[in-house]
Amino acid sequence: MKTLLAATAASFALTGAAMSQESDAQANIQVIQDYYAAYGTGDPEAVRPFLHEDVVWNIPGHHPMAGTKRGPDEVIAFFEGLAAGNFGAEPIFFQAQNDMVVDIHRGFSQVGEGPEVDQLYALMFRIRDGQIVEAQNFLTDMYESDRFFWAHFPLGPLPDRLGDAATASRSGNAPGSGGE
């Protein structure tokens, strides 16, 4: 009888833990669904409440918008660029386990001239304290994405891209120039 009671108690404990994990996973999916609703407003600042202060967002590619964005300000700056490209997202699928959420969505641009983007994306999100702390984008067509971003987000002139480093170098105050 004691064995049966212990087995029953263990079963309830495992069921409770599984229900808690399922509840957490559903809550994390809701965070991402709410994030997409905010993104859909077209106001990049609307996504700020969903970004953890330590957020890291990875954008693959060989274009000016690619790379790792660190912190809410860099992520918002990236979304401002997407807004300039009239980017839209139509969520299709969500799945969660523990602190991870994966979504598949159709991402598309509507610039009206030059190359456009219209493809499926998968994003892997890590959620901490109800906010996105990490995101990794996966593309179905990297070449299409690179063509679009190079056409619509060209790099500025070299001195402008170098900023303070170019100024310091011209004035002889760059590290190793002997002017420090």
Image (cartoon, rainbow, N blue to C red):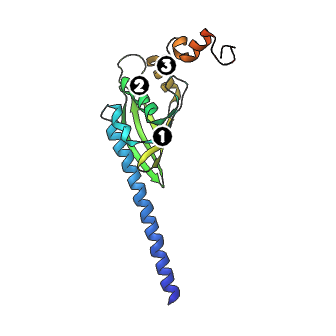
Q: Left or right of 106: which side holds 175? A: right
Task: Give the residue drawn at x 50%, y 90%.
Answer: 1
Task: Give the residue drawn at x 44%, y 36%.
Answer: 72
Q: Residue furthest front?
A: 180
> Residue 11, relative to residue 134: is it above or below?
below
Q: Amino acid at mark 2?
A: Gly
Ranked by sequence position, the earlier of labels 2 and 3 is 2
Nearer to us in this view, 80 or 140: 80
Q: CA distance from mark 1 to mark 3?
A: 26 Å
Q: Left or right of 149: which side holds 30? A: left
> Residue 88, relative to residue 13: is it above or below?
above
> Residue 10, relative to residue 65: is it above or below?
below
> Which mark lies nearer to you, 1 or 2?
1
Numbered marks: total: 3
For mark 1, give the secondary structure: strand
Nearer to us in this view, 169 or 11: 169
Ranked by sequence position, the earlier of labels 1 and 2 is 1
Say the numbered circle drawn on residue 103: none
Counting other residues with Cα less than 10 Å from the Cα at mark 1, is it few (<14), some (14-19), or many (20 or more)?
many
For mark 3, give the secondary structure: helix
Q: Amino acid at mark 1?
A: Val
Q: Which residue is mark 2?
A: 81
Task: Give the residue drawn at x 43%, y 32%.
Answer: 73
Horizontal and vertical percent position of residue 100:
48, 50
Q: Which residue is mark 1?
A: 55
Q: Are marks 1 and 2 in contact (CB under 8 Å)?
A: no
Horizontal and vertical percent position of residue 142:
52, 29
Q: Quadrant of residue 33?
A: top left
